[in-house]
Structure formats: structure tokens, C-alpha cells
């Protein structure tokens, strides 16, 4: 059996945990630089606020409807997520952290357990120890656990936020209830294609021919179909090194000058390089992109990207920044007001498996230099040591005008109780 534990309105729940006056009130959390809505409480959803709503376009609506607006407090959310996951590890040794607010539990050897009660126990334990409300779905496969979790979340009063699919009758009833567009892993494009052939529910999906599914949805779709049929096909995934690393940011204001944007590209490349070294990898290519503000229709628009291939694998901030800037030079155009840029490094190789070229290789002096820089920055704070091409006086800070205190990760923000 598999369990899926999903934190309810996680970002909103974290804000309410330290500010109980927000309970029952609409809450939205904004993306980097307070750009768009990335999380909503149930009350905000009921007001019709869509995911991805542009913040400045909804300012008046937020005020008129008493919506509490917060900048994304990722330090707080990450710490609370870690606490929840630590609690879940007490219930099974096999755990897959699926996202910041979701985790799969593999329940092997639980044949004689009352899984309904087990779900209630997990829910109570997490709520008591962390303050975060969760929903739990338990079923014979991962895909069915997702379905069970949706039922628990949709009907909290009937399920008490925990639901178990433990027989064929429950499985069929659940799949007939679930719309095809809401099936985990299907997505909008696949759901349109499936509806064209008469598939409107998850149950309909399990009844179509395997060959059709493999041909149109690939082997991944076929595995999903078998999982929904109750045939365990999808197992817990091991933590693997990332296949690409990205640093992308919207600027606090529109930028027009070449040097200003190039400095940002350099800083983004350095950030990617640091993450790359943490997983002991090197990369052999980088993508650089720049964009104007698509929400400013009165301005001329320009978006472009380029991929730069390296002549050798490297994880040196100096070399990766140089290649990224070379790519930026190819795509920069004068006369535009740029709002966003990004650097994505790709094509990773393990650092200890690098094969040297005959003529062109990464500078061997960079490896010990990067180790020292990383050690100093880890001890004294990020961006203490920078490349000369970075702005020495500037520390990258997102626009976070509505940021709540970092109650659990910053000493000055800890709640003070006066007795």
C-alpha cells in the first residue's frame, strides 16, 4: 500500500500558524518580486481569484474583499515542510518527498494494520507537532493514493481528511468520480485528446486499449493506466542529482542598459554554479534568456534565448559566467525595456568522471579556488566573495513588500511571549 500526505493550502497554513487571526479569512501568496498569485486559501478560491493572477491588476479587488496578501516567505515554508517530513519518517522508513507540501509513504508489512486509523493517527500527529493540517490518501498504488487524497480533500467532513481505497468497489467508484483532467500526470493537452475518443473520467481511461495509450501517451501513460487499475507500476523514486539548474528572476524595474543586465546574467550564472558544485557535478552547456514585460502592451516586446555549448565540462563560476555572458551578447538588442532574465545550466556529468581533452580543458586552478570561495560563503553568508564582474555593493533581494516574519529561521523574528 501507498500513502500520500498532502498539506492543506500549505503556504496559507504556514501564515495562519503564527497569526491565528487569519483563520477563516481569504489569503493569497505572491511569487518572486510580488508578481503573481501562486497560492490561495479556500476562502480566496471561493472569491474567484485565479492561480497566476497578476498582483497589481487585483490590488483593488484584494482591498475591497479583505484579502490578506503575503510575499512568498520561502524560508518559513521550507522549514515547516522539513518539520512535517521529519514527522512522517516516523511512520515508515520508505518515504518520497514529492514536493514542498506532499510526500508518498510506502506501507510495506501493514497488512494487519487498520489503515483508516493509521491515517487518522498520522494526521493528528502532524497537526499536533507542527500545526499544519494535512489530508491523507491510502491505496494499493501511487496513482490511486493520489485519487484517495483528492477524495479526502474534497469531502473533509465525510472522510475526516483521510480516505483509504482498499477494495475493488471503492476503486471503481473513485475512478468514475474523478474527471480525466484531474488525473495525476494527464495534463490539459492529454485530457483534450482523451475526451475526443470518449474518455471523460479516470475509469474510462482504465478501459481503453493499452496499445492506444502507449502510442498516444507513451510508456509513461501506460504505467499510469496500470497504476489506476490497481497494478503497482510506479514505485518510490530515489533522490537523483538534478538534470538542470536554473536561476531566473524578474527585475525590480525595467532595465535597458547592457551592463546592468550583463551583471545580472553573471550573478545568475554564479548562483547556478554554486548549486552545481553542491551535487558534485559539472555541466557542458548553458541556456540564457531575456524577456521584456509582456504585461506592458504599450512597450515594444522582445524575447530571445540561446544555448551555448562548452568545449569542456566545468563547474567553475568564472568559466560558466563567461560562457553565459557570451550567450547574452548574442541575444541582447538595444532599445528594449527588459523585465526578466535567466540562466539554465544543462548536460551534467559527475565531477569525478570527467575525461580530459587533448587541447582544451577547464582551468585546474579553479577547482581549489571554488572550494575556498564556497567554504567562506557558507561560513559568513552568501555573496561575501564575488566575481569582479558582479556588482560588489549589490546583494540580490527580491521585491517582498508584504513579507511576514521568518518566525522559525531568524532569531530576531521569533515570537516573544509576555507573561
Image (cartoon, grey):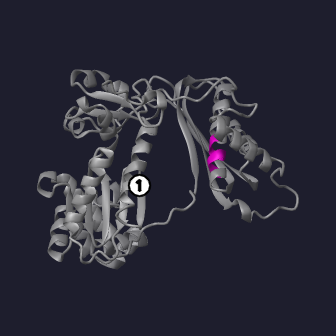
Magenta span covers which residues?
271-276
**Residue 98 drawn at (x, y percent):** 41, 57
Q: Which of 160 and 346 is in front in this view?
A: 160
User: Is 62 part of what is drawn in magenta?
Assistant: no
Element at label 1: helix
Left-right relation of 20 to 361: left
Within 10 Å of the Cα at label 1, are there few (<14), some (14-19), or many (20+) other Cα atoms? Answer: few
User: Is 274 part of what is drawn in magenta?
Assistant: yes
| Residue linked to disc 1 | 86
**Residue 158 drawn at (x, y percent):** 11, 56
| Image height of 340 relative to 288, above or below | above
| Image height of 263 relative to 51, above or below | above
Q: Is residue 198 in view?
A: no
Q: Which of 98 and 373 is in front in this view?
A: 373
Residue at image location 32% in from the left, 75% down from the top: 226
Image quarter (top left, top right, bottom left or bottom right) of the N terminus: bottom left
Residue 40 lies in quadrant: top left
| Image height of 57 relative to 31, above or below | above
What secondary structure characterizes most of the magenta part? Answer: helix
Q: Nearer the viewer, residue 34 or 392?
A: 392
Left-right relation of 264 to 41: right
| Image height of 334 relative to 272, above or below | above
Amino acid at each position: 500500500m501507498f500513502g500520500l500526505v498532502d498539506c492543506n493550502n500549505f503556504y496559507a497554513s504556514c501564515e495562519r500558524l503564527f497569526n491565528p487571526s487569519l483563520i477563516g479569512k481569504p489569503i493569497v501568496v505572491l511569487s518572486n518580486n510580488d508578481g503573481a498569485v501562486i497560492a490561495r486559501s479556500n476562502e480566496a478560491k471561493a472569491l474567484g481569484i485565479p492561480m497566476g493572477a497578476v498582483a497589481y491588476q487585483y490590488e483593488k479587488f484584494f482591498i475591497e474583499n479583505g484579502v490578506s496578501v503575503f510575499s512568498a516567505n520561502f524560508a518559513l515554508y521550507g522549514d515547516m515542510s522539513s518539520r512535517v517530513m521529519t514527522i512522517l519518517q516516523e511512520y515508515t522508513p520508505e518515504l518520497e518527498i514529492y514536493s514542498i507540501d506532499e510526500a508518498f509513504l510506502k506501507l510495506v508489512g501493514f497488512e494487519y494494520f487498520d489503515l483508516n486509523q493509521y491515517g487518522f493517527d498520522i494526521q493528528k500527529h502532524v497537526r499536533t507537532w507542527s500545526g499544519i493540517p494535512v489530508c491523507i490518501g491510502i491505496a494499493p498504488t501511487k496513482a490511486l493514493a493520489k485519487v484517495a487524497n483528492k477524495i479526502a480533500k474534497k469531502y473533509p467532513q465525510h472522510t475526516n481528511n483521510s480516505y483509504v481505497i482498499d477494495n475493488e468497489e471503492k476503486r471503481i467508484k473513485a475512478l468514475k468520480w474523478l474527471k480525466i483532467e484531474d488525473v495525476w500526470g494527464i495534463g490539459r493537452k492529454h485530457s483534450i485528446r482523451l475526451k475526443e475518443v470518449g474518455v471523460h473520467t479516470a475509469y474510462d481511461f482504465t478501459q481503453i486499449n493499452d496499445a492506444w495509450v502507449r502510442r498516444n501517451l507513451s510508456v509513461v501513460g501506460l504505467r499510469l493506466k496500470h497504476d489506476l487499475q490497481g497494478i503497482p507500476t510506479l514505485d518510490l523514486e530515489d533522490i537523483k542529482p538534478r538534470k538542470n539548474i536554473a536561476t531566473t528572476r524578474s527585475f525590480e524595474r525595467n532595465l535597458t542598459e547592457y551592463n546592468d543586465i550583463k551583471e545580472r546574467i553573471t550573478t545568475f550564472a554564479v548562483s547556478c554554479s554554486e548549486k552545481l558544485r553542491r551535487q558534485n557535478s559539472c555541466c557542458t552547456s548553458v541556456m540564457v534568456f531575456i524577456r521584456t514585460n509582456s504585461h506592458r502592451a504599450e512597450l515594444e516586446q522582445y524575447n530571445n534565448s540561446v544555448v551555448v555549448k562548452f568545449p569542456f565540462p566545468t563547474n567553475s563560476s568564472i568559466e560558466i559566467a563567461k560562457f553565459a555572458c557570451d550567450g547574452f551578447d548574442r541575444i541582447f538588442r538595444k532599445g528594449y525595456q527588459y523585465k526578466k532574465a535567466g540562466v539554465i545550466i544543462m548536460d551534467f556529468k559527475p565531477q569525478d568522471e570527467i575525461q580530459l581533452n587533448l587541447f582544451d580543458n577547464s582551468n585546474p586552478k579553479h577547482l581549489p579556488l571554488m572550494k575556498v570561495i564556497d567554504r567562506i560563503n557558507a561560513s559568513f553568508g552568501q555573496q561575501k566573495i564575488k566575481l569582479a564582474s558582479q556588482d560588489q555593493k549589490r546583494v540580490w533581494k527580491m521585491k517582498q513588500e508584504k513579507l511576514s516574519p521568518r518566525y522559525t529561521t531568524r532569531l530576531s523574528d521569533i515570537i516573544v511571549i509576555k507573561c
